[in-house]
Amino acid sequence: MSPWAVLKAWLAVTLPRPAFAFSYVSVLLVAGLLAGYWHARVKTTNWDKILAGRYVQAVDPLQRSSGN
């Protein structure tokens, strides 16, 4: 039995109405995408700050970056 068939059977038993099951899965998918986007945004902001400090130090090694 394929993993998709197992998932479909579980959803059919757990969520008896297909429209409700579809909306449940859709909400979880959107929530996961938004959480991933937010996490990537935070990571990118942190990396931008770190790289900006490294750039300032590379251009002028005696210059202290504001991040440190």
Image: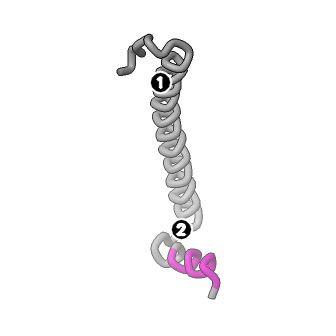
| Image quarter hosting the C terminus | top left
| Residue extent of the magenta highlight | 2-10
Q: Secondary structure at mark 2?
A: loop
Which SS type dominates the magenta stretch? helix
Give above or below for 17 relative to 38: below
In the image, residue 23 lies at what x, y percent?
55, 56
Q: Are marks 2 and 1 in contact (CB under 8 Å)?
A: no
- Based on the displayed image, in which of its 4 quarters is residue 21 positioned? bottom right
Q: What residue sits right under mark 1 in the picture?
A: 49
**Quarter-wise, where is residue 59 in the image?**
top right
Q: Does the magenta run of residues contain 19?
A: no
In the image, residue 48 sits, relative to residue 30, either above or below, namely above
**Which is nearer the eye, 2 or 36?**
36
Q: Is residue 6 above or below residue 37?
A: below
| Displayed quadrant of residue 26 | bottom right
Identify which residue is drawn at 50% across, 54% down.
28
Q: How far from the left and from the top, in percent, is residue 42? A: 46, 34
Q: Residue 9 in magenta?
A: yes
Q: Which residue type does callout 1 highlight?
A: Lys
According to the image, label 2 marks what residue? 17
